[in-house]
Image (tube, rainbow, N blue to C red):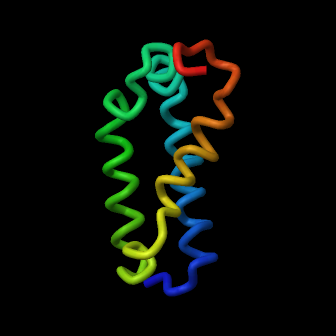
Amino acid sequence: MITSPEAAQRLARAIASDLSLYNKDKIIQGIEEDNFFELLANEIEEGRAHYMKKVDPSIVENTNFFDLALVDIILARSADVKSKIW
């Protein structure tokens, strides 16, 4: 069980990185069509479940490392994809 916020943040970023690596086409499609979270709902929930299984509940309840990692690792790095939202 991960009890360090720093380690929890690293895990969240690693999971987001894996999502990015293995779902490139879906990520591009989701950004272009403005349905990123809907299109990748299963993958995101699988990643979130893994994160929550590994991280101490007090960290999960008091931080949003997983959601921040999705934005920082996947969305921000995909800023070059044409989208209605940016």
Which of the 4 quarters of the picture holds residue 56?
A: bottom left
Compared to residue 10, the image places residue 17 above or below, namely above
Decide if residue 80 is on the left or right side of residue 70: right
Decide if residue 30 is on the left or right side of residue 74: left
Which of the 4 quarters of the picture holds residue 50?
A: bottom left
Instruction: Give the tally of numbered discs.
Output: 0
Which x, y percent locates residue 13? Answer: 59, 57
Question: Which residue is at 47% across, 63% downward?
Answer: 64
Compared to residue 27, the image places residue 14 above or below, namely below
Instruction: Quadrant for the N terminus, please.
Output: bottom left
Q: Which residue lies furthest to the front in this view?
A: 85
Which x, y percent locates residue 55? Answer: 43, 76
Instruction: Quadrant for the C terminus, please.
Output: top right
Decide if residue 41 is on the left or right side of residue 25: left
Which x, y percent locates residue 43? Answer: 36, 42
Question: Which residue is at 38% across, 23% downward?
Answer: 35
In this rendered view, identify the residue nearer to me: 25 or 79: 79
Question: Which residue is at 39% across, 83% downward?
Answer: 58
Which x, y percent locates residue 36? Answer: 42, 28
Question: Which residue is at 43% across, 20% downward?
Answer: 34
Which of the 4 quarters of the picture holds residue 68?
A: bottom right
